[in-house]
Image (cartoon, coloured by chain):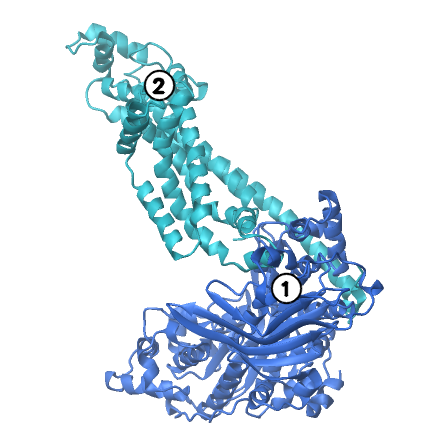
Chain colours: A blue, B cyan
Amino acid sequence: MTTTLVSEQDAAAQPRAADDVVLRARDLTVSFTRAGQQHQVVHSVSFELRRGECLAIVGESGSGKSVTARTLVGLTGAGARVDAGELSLDVPGTTDRVDLAHTRESQWRRLRGRRIGFVLQDALVSLDPLRPVGNEIEEALRLHGWGRRADRRRKAIELLDSVGVPQPEQRARQRPDELSGGLRQRALIASALALDPKLIIADEPTTALDVTVQAQVLALLADTKRRGVSQILISHDLSVVAELADQIAVMTNGRIVEAGTAEQVLRDPQHPYTRRLLAAVPGPHTRGARLSDLAPVTAQRHPHHDDGDTGPVLEARGLVKRFPRPDGSVATAVDNVSFTLERGQTLGIVGESGSGKSTTARIALALSTPDAGEVRLVGRDWSRVSERRRRALRRRISVVYQDPLSSFDPRWNTERILLDALPPGTPRAIRQSRVRELVEQVGLTDAVLQRFPLTLSGGQRQRIAIARALAPSPQILVLDEAVSALDVSVQAQILDLLDDLKRQLGLSYLFISHDLGVISHMSDDVLVMKDGRVVEHGTVEQIFTAPEHAYTAELVGVTSVAARQHPESLTLTDAE
Amino acid sequence: MTHISPPEIDEAGSTHARHETDAAAGSARRTANRITLIRRIVGKLLGAAVTLFGAATVAFLAQLALPGDRATVIFNIRAGQAIERTPEELAQINEQYGLLNPVLVQYVDYLRALVSGTLGMSYQQFRPVSEIILEQLGPTLTLTVTAIVLSWLIMVIWVTLTAGRGPRLSAFGAMVDTTAAGLPHYWLGSILLVVFALGLGWFPVISGTSTIGLLLPALTLAIPLAGFMGQATRAEFERTLQQPFIVTARMRGMSETGVRLRHVLRHSVLPAVTLSGWALGATISGAVIVESLFSRQGIGTVLITAVNAQDLPIVTGIVVLIAALYVVANLVVDVIYTLIDPRLPLS
């Protein structure tokens, strides 16, 4: 069934249609043909989206959630085959429906943007980086023959204003790279809202954003929903979903395994996968508990690095680091930062992008020299001595980064990567057995040794990165956003692994993350950083129950949304 | 549409403060960008001056390094015969050209002639070098600029039509690029001449200065260049097609053609723009062959004659001129690049 589109009228003036299902999918199946073989990636997915509601499709990478979303606008991709019992979109003001399963490309083009708006993650790359954001919004209008050029310009500015962009005339002339993350994401949303579509599909709309900005963008989407715009929200992040969704569909391996109201799914999950997913979300309430159902690893402690000291393993006093800007002025990336990492403890450093947390990590690793202040490692001079003198201490401190792939030579297999990481002077006879021991410590088997980084999964790569960091038997691990790129269930496994290793090997962690949930799960003490300064420093309990600084309170407020779903943690979050 | 009130967005009440900080940061960033831009322009101009000075100096030193007595050479060029000259005769030439002056004085005289724009006197023609070059520069510039414009047209149309259109068409497109890039000017020119001028008679065999006669020589230069730039553009074109902002444009209802012309092309021509600066210089050397093949006037003929006759001021003049064209072309490329990609490198 194909209907012609009627012109848009004021939604409020319309008589309520008998059927208020905006979008209905029944037995939606998507498969791709690659190398002559069919791979089915979405299996018989069915859902209904009612007017003014938000349906969240939650899943991890590879679950088929993004493919499903793209199928709804006819952009599944090359070589895709879409079958559906029904896939239909309502026509406002009528009882007619557009059959999306049998829509020609020319008809899709009239629907996209006008009837269905689409928001992708990270406007820095989802808006044309060479054009002013105003032009992108005007383009959405122009493609559907909206008004004259001058009218479109005016409308674009109005739209920017309506999504809460200050000084819209000026902002319209700026490119995405000239706007802050929050402003450009708003501009992206404005371009999707330009023709007032009654359905918005948002694919990970807040994933690349800092938590405080994420909260603003979610509030904007909530406002849009209140105006009667139906939404499909695609996300891996349960806290985002909890904020916005009326209905939740949990997807894994191309199937919806559980669907229901947000309340039902979050409070009383029925399917084991949903339960695992919810249990895997770290927060203050999960401290000391395991997040995954993986068996703990056992690791053999090597006695040689235990030198009987009891003092702190890492101490930083008054660190300052400045960088010149291109125009000659000076930016202070780290401003008077001090901390102490006690033996066997975890110190969390939390902050948003640009807060100076990674620069602090580099100074702690002596990869960067502070302009003022000093770092002492196991009670000895560290930041102020020459690299030659540091070398003897180097093996006491190791690092794991967010993206291990870029730190592995793609032509080396795992065995070579790990052999290379063993400290010089390791007797030849024990090198092989030591590599096997390392692989076991991180919960992998020997089979992984002959594989190359590119053929490993994200979780396996991160385990290899941890094994490599452990190769010199360090006392301290610096974990710089080490779990940030992982899916929540994989993240849970890696966090559990790190917890096991810490206890069994007597490690101390400097744990750096933007994610307060992860920080609160892992840390003993927490340092909150903003604009290069430490705004708050205390134990996890202090930070979460009685944040003193307004910024910490804001941060705790926006991160604890997921935690609110857990009644046992309410005492912690209500105290703010 | 209804207005979404900003206070909703930021319950912490810091909306106002945040916006002001954003605005201040924005204007500071723009000022910073402007300062960086001015620095870059000044840097480029200084760099251009140094390049020109360097090219002129190398050309001067090459003159000194040539074997044989220069006064004798000059005499022989004028007389058209190679015989020994008496010291009296040579003294007159040495006096006239200051050949016995210290090298440094000769160098300063040379630079003075360069700056005054005459570029010295031709040994053979008794005229300022600048006059001789300028007469012939027009046809050559017409040829090379036409060739570059044509190669851009061919390249853009071909890449837009074939890049990222499924494995078979893309591979065919890339193969044509590579083949075209490898065609030698001499061979390609001969084929074009034989087929289109001699065989079909569509174009004159001797190009002269006519507009219609310009097409075959320009194509001879343009086709290999189009293939060469096409390789760089195609790779970038296919990479850009995968970018999220292209998906966004499609999600707005943009057609395949619209996406290619309005978004992808702008990103993908950047490497070819950089190559064009180099190409202008390269096509001038290519023009030497093409001009003789198609019997066209131009700097190529002048250069060949001057080199054969050892008319050094002309050779030096052309070397300096080509260096100057390179410098100008690269400045133009920088400006065009900045117009296409206004983002400034932050490092």
Badge 2 marks a residue whose secondary structure is: loop
Report if residue A127 is visible in the image: no
Distance in Å between CA atoms under marks 2 and 1: 59 Å
Counting from the top left corner in percent of width and height, residue B254 is at: 59, 53
Q: In this view, does A549 lie to the left or right of B111?
A: right
Which residue in the structure is indicated by mark 2? B297
Q: Is residue A545 left or right of residue A452?
A: right
* Subunit of label 2: B
Relative depth, front residue between A123 and A69: A69
Q: In which quarter of the image is residue B252?
A: bottom right
Relative depth, front residue between B337 and B256: B256
Q: In this view, does A140 lie to the left or right of A84?
A: right
Of the 4 image quadrants, the one containing the N terminus of chain B is bottom right
Marks 2 and 1 in Cβ contact (< 8 Å): no
Which residue in the structure is indicated by mark 1? A119
Residue at 47 percent of width and 45 percent of height: B269
Q: Quadrant of residue A103?
A: bottom right
Counting from the top left corner in percent of width and height, residue A421 is at: 35, 77
Badge 1 marks a residue whose secondary structure is: strand
